[in-house]
Image (tube, rainbow, N blue to C red):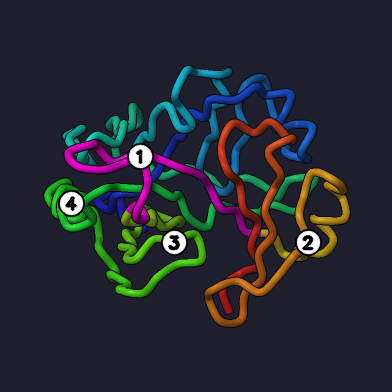
Amino acid sequence: MTDTQIAVERIAVAAEPAAWSGAGFAVDGSTARVGSVALELVGPAAGKRIVSCSLRGVTSTDFDGLPIVPAAGGGASVETAPSHPNGVTRIDHVVAFTPDLDRTVAAGQALGLDLRRVRDEPAPAGSPRQAFFRIGEAMLEVAQAPDGSPLAGDSPARFYGLAFVVDDIDATAASLGELCGEPRDAIQPGRRIATVRKQAGLGLPVALMTPRP
């Protein structure tokens, strides 16, 4: 990664550190470092899942309502953290929903984000179209809100959840016990996925995925 590339540096999540520690993440105070990204666990915030997302390489905060902030460290890259006790090695992607995919894509491109592709196919959760931006070692998946969603009309885009990479998804699922669903085939060929259950208290939907082939 060059210093001029846009990359996620820090994500503030509306959850308690103890919940993430209980799900097998190594938490130091209120911070869990995942790959090159710092997750700040800031406690519950009304109506929030992700409170803010700090990006290196941007100067604007205008991203169709998504709470983006320029990274305090400027363009400097950071060291990659070791894997967590639960087997998580890095963030695979950050998920956001929007009532108007074309509008949000245009805002992301204006911000300077690297649009990799737009998929005009329905996703298992009901989204009819999705766009994918590269933000450092992770992807940002922006999904068109499905029909009947409360996110409609002129509503801004909203962050939704996180997906993490684990080397051995069966071992991770077993270590989490009742906090994790059974691993299954993912929509991406050659990958498997499991979801962390809401009772884990992580503050937002969390998925675990095997590495990309």
Residue 59, quarter of picture:
top left
* Mark 4 vs 3: CB contact within 8 A: no
Give the residue pinned by disc 1.
150
- Seen in the image, is 94 located left or right of residue 200? left
Percent from the top left, x then y, of residue 18? 74, 23
Three-letter amino acid code of the residue under disc 1: Pro
Establish if 83 lies above or below 67.
Answer: below
* Residue 63, numbered label: none
How far is mark 3 from mark 2, CA to CA?
21 Å
Name the residue rendered at 53%, 75% in the picture.
Answer: 188
Percent from the top left, x then y, of residue 57? 25, 43
Marks 1, 4: nearer the viewer: 1
Three-letter amino acid code of the residue under disc 3: Gly
Give the residue pinned by disc 4.
112
Three-letter amino acid code of the residue under disc 4: Gly
Marks 3, 2: nearer the viewer: 3
- Seen in the image, is 71 located left or right of residue 37? left
Query: Which circle's residue, 3 or 2, is located before the other in the chain?
Result: 3
Query: Which circle's residue, 1 or 4, is located before the other in the chain?
Result: 4
- Seen in the image, is 155 located left or right of residue 14? left
Three-letter amino acid code of the residue under disc 2: Glu
How far is mark 1 from mark 3, CA to CA?
14 Å
Percent from the top left, x then y, of residue 29? 67, 19
Give the residue pinned by disc 3.
126
Task: Specify start and end residues of the magenta stretch as a single range.
Answer: 145-165
Give the residue pinned by disc 2.
182
Helix, strand, or loop for circle 3? loop
Toward the viewer: 158 or 153?
A: 153
How far is mark 4 from mark 2, CA to CA?
38 Å
Q: Is residue 162 magenta?
A: yes
Query: Which circle's residue, 4 or 2, is located before the other in the chain?
Result: 4
